[in-house]
């Protein structure tokens, strides 16, 4: 009980099966990033074509995000996330069965990319349905934690599986995992608890169109959207090109996978610690400022370091702060834009990061040096993150968390 609010332990089961689903979709998104060279050779295509397999998720997101948020807000999380679960199960296994064909890989990646917004846009909506206000950043953090586990597995495990077996065998294993998790989610998901986890009246929300109008009228939301445009776009681009960022300095795909895994390990720890502290102190803006400041040295180390241990430390720091900023930022946006639907505010933040991610991925490839290094645009990211840190100083704490 929280005051006169009854809480149900089943909320943790809901969060667990949702988190498993999140792990599955992230594995599919990032699985080719740390084997770009091997995959390009296996399918007889260019490294950019392999990069496009990850970028497809960002491109498709631009078109599916708003419809996905609308469906989640209008028909509920069971139906909305359920669409994503069905797509992940079906096309995850098809991808595994036909993984020898690049055409099949592209086709199934598009279908899996359609599933992604039904998962990513539901974090704060699921938290609002099942968790009280002082647990929502934590719940969103755990969902993000699962996202990072999926990414770390996709980055770190894929090179070793591919080198031990083959690309088709590895994709088949991922397909089996996908269909198992999808079935598990469908069996255990429930729409909402018998009574809401908030005080009377706080469960009311605007309709989707009215909510979007409300969001776009708020200066603070535009600042948060800009933060995500820069920060999430940078994260998407760096994780997509992680092998290509390190290769000119003499590091191989397995080392790139380990660096990516170090980044995700930092993100996992950050997603546990900082959202918990944010909930405990009932503050969001100050934690976003801290994250933006400490992202900068991590990004600088990943850009310039030549010693492998220093790159690992830098990637860990980068992951810790950028990946903990995500759930705190999602929850902050949900609070300042209340009573707009949570999946609408979260969907817009993710949409901005997907659009910028597409731009940044192409720009990183276009601005390579003659040696193939991506240093010029990595320096640009450092400058942009300084701007992000300054932007957070203009954020004001939400009335909802302080009430």
Image: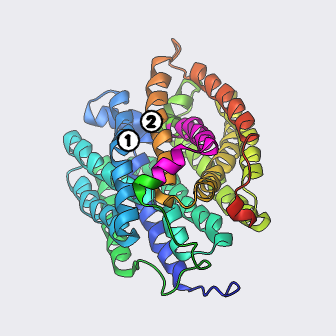
SS at mark 1 in the image: helix
* In the depicted structure, whether residue 97 falls above or below residue 354: below
Q: Indicate whether residue 55 is drawn in magenta.
A: no
Is residue 390 something one can see in this rendering? yes
In this rendering, the answer to whether 14 lies above or below 156 is: below
- The answer to which of 324 and 320 lies nearer the viewer is 324
Q: Which colour scheme is used?
A: rainbow
Q: Position of residue 394 (x, y in %)?
A: 74, 40
What residue does disc 2 label?
355
Most foreground residue, 93 or 280:
280
| Residue that badge 1 annotates | 62
In the displayed structure image, the side of residue 51 where residue 94 appears, left or right: left
The main secondary structure of the magenta stretch is helix
Q: Is mark 2 on a helix, strand or loop?
A: helix
Q: Is residue 184 above or below residue 48?
A: below
* Callout 2 crowding tier (Cα within 10 Å): few <14, some 14–19, many ≥20: some
Q: Residues within 10 Å of mark 1 (few under 14, many from 20)?
A: many
Q: Could you say where residue 179 lies in the image, as x and y percent from the top left?
A: 30, 67
Is residue 323 found left or right of 181 in the rendered image?
right
Q: Where is residue 205 in the image (x, y as percent from the top left)?
A: 49, 65
Q: In this view, does 384 lie to the left or right of 171?
A: right
Question: Which residue shows up at 36% across the image and 55% down it?
Answer: 68
Residue occupying the point 73% across, 61% down: 278
Residue 166 visible in this rendered orientation of the protein:
no
> Which segment did they paint magenta?
211-236
Q: Quadrant of residue 289?
A: top right
Q: In which quarter of the image is the N terminus?
A: bottom right
Q: How far apart are marks 2 and 1 (CA)?
A: 7 Å
Which residue is located at x 51 percent, y 53 percent?
346
């Amino acid at each position: 009980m929280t005051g006169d609010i009854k809480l149900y332990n089943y909320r943790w089961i809901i969060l667990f099966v949702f988190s498993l689903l999140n792990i599955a979709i992230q594995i599919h998104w990032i699985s080719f990033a740390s084997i770009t060279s091997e995959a390009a050779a296996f399918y007889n295509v260019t490294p950019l074509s392999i990069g496009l397999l990850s970028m497809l998720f960002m491109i498709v997101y631009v078109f599916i995000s708003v419809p996905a948020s609308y469906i989640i807000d209008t028909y509920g999380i069971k139906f909305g996330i359920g669409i994503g679960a069905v797509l992940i199960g079906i096309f995850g296994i098809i991808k595994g069965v036909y993984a020898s064909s690049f055409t099949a890989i592209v086709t199934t990646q598009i279908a899996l990319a359609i599933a992604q917004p039904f998962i990513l846009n539901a974090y704060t909506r699921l938290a609002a349905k099942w968790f009280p206000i002082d647990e929502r950043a934590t719940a969103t953090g755990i969902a993000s934690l699962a996202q990072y586990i999926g990414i770390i597995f996709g980055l770190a495990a894929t090179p070793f599986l591919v080198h031990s077996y083959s690309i088709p065998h590895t994709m088949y294993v991922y397909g089996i995992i996908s269909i198992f998790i999808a079935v598990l989610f469908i069996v255990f998901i429930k729409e909402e608890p018998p009574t809401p986890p908030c005080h009377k009246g706080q469960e009311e929300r605007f309709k989707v169109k009215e909510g979007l109008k409300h969001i776009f009228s708020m200066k603070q939301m535009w600042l948060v959207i800009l933060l995500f445009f820069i920060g999430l776009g940078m994260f998407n681009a760096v994780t997509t090109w992680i092998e290509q960022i390190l290769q000119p300095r003499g590091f191989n795909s397995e080392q790139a996978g380990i660096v990516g895994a170090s980044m995700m390990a930092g993100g996992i720890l950050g997603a546990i610690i900082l959202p918990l502290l944010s909930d405990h102190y009932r503050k969001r803006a100050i934690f976003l400022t801290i994250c933006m400041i400490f992202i900068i040295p991590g990004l600088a180390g990943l850009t310039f370091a030549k010693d492998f241990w220093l790159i690992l430390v830098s990637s860990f720091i980068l992951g810790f702060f950028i990946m903990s900023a995500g759930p705190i930022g999602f929850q902050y946006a949900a609070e300042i834009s209340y009573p707009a639907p949570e999946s609408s505010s979260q969907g817009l933040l993710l949409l901005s990061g997907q659009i910028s991610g597409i731009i940044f991925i192409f720009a990183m490839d276009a601005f390579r040096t003659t040696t193939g290094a991506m240093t010029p645009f990595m320096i640009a990211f450092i400058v942009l993150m300084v701007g992000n840190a300054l932007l957070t100083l203009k954020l004001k704490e939400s009335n909802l968390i302080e009430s």
